[in-house]
Amino acid sequence: MALARRFGQRRSTQASRERLTNHRREGGERWGTVAADVQFHTGQGYQSFGAAEQEELALHAFLQALTPERLHQHVIMATPRSLDEALKEAERAEDVLCLAPSQTACWRRKSAGHAHPHSSDDSVHRRYDVAAATAVTSQDT
């Protein structure tokens, strides 16, 4: 019985490490779910590591899971120091860069279903919206 527990634990640890290494976002899965999975598998796969080491491993695994490549590069360039910082930056950047898998159109194209992340009363952002919409329109023609 003790051997079964010990080898079962080893298999569980190895499985968590493999899931951590190979974790990718599935379908419309939220980045918060990916971060929670990464954190769980880090804790299960590296129980003997300290909290700081687990945080570093979780951050690295989350960064590796980021897709598309444009989002991955953006979040890395933001140099997050924690999983939480990386998650916040990924969510923010995905919205601004119009990369969310569930979005059918971008706010820059002024289409329904995607709200502008800033107040409509902000004249700086209104000018940016007009410039972006003009650029998109001129590219489409």
Image (tube, rainbow, N blue to C red):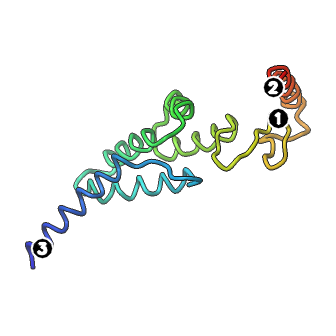
Q: Position of residue 65 (x, y in %)?
A: 45, 43
Residues marked 2 and 3 touching at CB (< 8 Å): no
Could you tell me the amino acid type at mark 2? Val
Question: Amino acid type of disc 1?
Answer: Arg
Q: Residues within 10 Å of mark 2 (few under 14, many from 20)?
A: few
* Element marked by disc 1: helix
Taking 113 as reference, is 61 left or right? left
| Rendered image: mark on residue 109 | 1
Instruction: Tell me which residue sits at (51%, 52%) in the image.
Output: 26
Q: Are marks 2 and 1 in contact (CB under 8 Å)?
A: yes
How crowded pointer 3 is (Cα within 10 Å; few <14, some 14-19, many 20+) is rated as few
Give the numbered dot on residue 4. 3
* Residue at horizontal 70 percent and vertical 36 percent from the top: 96
Reading the chain from its start, which is encountered first: label 2 or label 1? 1
Q: Find residue 138 and report its horizontal and vertical position in percent.
A: 85, 20
Q: Quadrant of residue 87?
A: top right
Check disc 2 and report its element: helix, strand or loop: helix
Return the mark for residue 136: 2
Task: State the separation of the CA atoms marked 2 and 1.
Answer: 7 Å
Give the CA separation, mark 2 to mark 3.
62 Å
Q: Nearer the viewer, residue 134 or 78?
A: 134
- Residue at figure coordinates x 26%, y 53% from the top left: 46
